[in-house]
Amino acid sequence: MSRKLLLVALSVVAVAIIYVTPAVAVDCSGIRGDVNNDGAITGADVTYLVNCLWLGGPNPPCIDQADINCNGKVFYDDIDFLILYLQGQYTIPCE
């Protein structure tokens, strides 16, 4: 088998595996502000949200938990509110 044909065959198999593999269900913690869904609200959640919104990182596993100000969308102001919450200067309104 030629090398080119082998690469094409492996590519087809890889694509088939990606499309056949079922999505993994995420069990959300339900804690508003727990952006990375690890069960606690910490600076890691700020980092995750900055990575998502500014650097093109992955979306939060549980999108509602990243909506810190409870306005129905995750946007840059949620970063500010999360930092204020961690400093004790903000109360999450929909908890």
Image (cartoon, grey):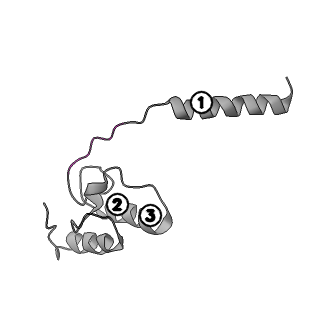
Q: Which of the image's four quarters has the N terminus?
A: top right
Q: Amino acid at mark 2?
A: Ala
* Vertical arrangement, residue 84 with respect to residue 32, above or below: below
Q: Amino acid at mark 3?
A: Asn
Mark closer to the observer (3, 2): 3
Q: Which mark is residue 51?
A: 3
Mark closer to the observer (2, 1): 1
For label 1, the crowd category at 10 Å Cα-Cα, with few meaning under 14, some 14 to 19 and many 20 or more, is: few
Q: Residue 61: x and y, percent?
A: 35, 50
Name the foreground residue: 85 vs 28: 28
- Please name the residue shown 69% across and 34% down the image: 11
Q: Earlier in the sequence, mark 3 or mark 1?
A: 1
- Please name the residue shown 81% across and 29% down the image: 5
Q: Residue 82: x and y, percent?
A: 26, 69
For label 3, the crowd category at 10 Å Cα-Cα, with few meaning under 14, some 14 to 19 and many 20 or more, is: some
In the picture as drawn, the residue positioned furthest to the top comes out as 1
Q: Which mark is residue 44?
A: 2
- Please name the residue shown 32% across and 61% down the image: 45
> What secondary structure prevails in the magenta region?
loop
Q: Earlier in the sequence, mark 2 or mark 1?
A: 1
Q: Which residues are magenta?
A: 25-30
**In this rendering, would 54 be left or right of 17?**
left
Residue 65 in the magenta stretch? The answer is: no
Q: Earlier in the sequence, mark 3 or mark 2?
A: 2
- What secondary structure is marked by label 1? helix
